[in-house]
């Protein structure tokens, strides 16, 4: 995350679920209340046994997360 360090309020474990029911755990998630976006690193995705690819269809780009 780029920007002032005052944005970061803490660091904890986090877990979230994708629409298909797949759960991803992040061991050191940064809590930034006023951040303009949510950040999930490729390292976190890979550590949970998933692979990330981008695909383009009809001029729209999609991020695809698949299991290894």
Image (cartoon, grey):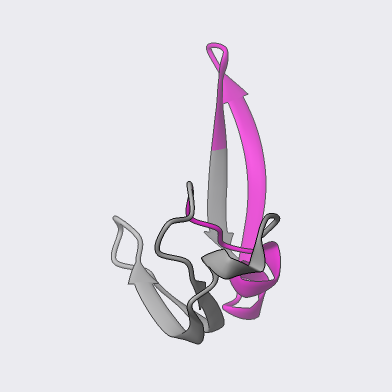
Q: Is residue 9 above or below residue 20?
A: below
Q: Nearer the viewer, residue 49 or 28?
A: 28
Q: Please provide percent x and percent y for residue 44.
A: 62, 73
> In the image, is 37 to the left or to the right of 19?
right
Q: Taking the image as drawn, is residue 68 in sight? A: no
Q: Which quadrant does the C terminus fall into? A: bottom right
> In the image, is 16 to the left or to the right of 59?
left
Residue projecting furthest to the top: 58
Q: Which residues are magenta?
A: 37-62
Q: Nearer the viewer, residue 61 or 40?
A: 40
- Residue 13 highlighted magenta (yes or no): no
* Residue 7 lies in quadrant: bottom right
Q: Taking the image as drawn, is residue 5 in sight? A: yes
Q: Please provide percent x and percent y for residue 21.
A: 29, 66
- Residue 40 highlighted magenta (yes or no): yes
Q: Nearer the viewer, residue 25 or 66?
A: 25
Please name the residue shown 56% across and 62% down the image: 40
Q: Which quadrant does the N terminus fall into? A: bottom right
Q: Is residue 57 above or below residue 34?
A: above
Please name the residue shown 68% across and 55% down the image: 3
Q: How many marks?
A: 0
> In the image, is 27 to the left or to the right of 42?
left
Q: Is residue 41 above or below residue 27?
A: above
Q: Is residue 14 above or below residue 40?
A: below
* Residue 55 lies in quadrant: top right
Please name the residue shown 54% across and 34% down the image: 62
Please name the residue shown 61% across and 24% down the image: 56
Q: Please provide percent x and percent y for residue 61.
A: 58, 27
């Amino acid at each position: 995350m780029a920007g002032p360090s005052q944005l970061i309020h803490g660091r904890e474990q986090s877990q979230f679920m994708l629409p298909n029911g797949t759960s991803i755990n992040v061991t050191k998630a940064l809590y930034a209340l006023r951040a303009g976006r949510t950040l999930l690193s490729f390292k976190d995705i890979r550590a949970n046994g998933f692979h990330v690819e981008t695909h383009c269809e009809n001029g729209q780009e999609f991020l695809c997360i698949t299991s290894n």
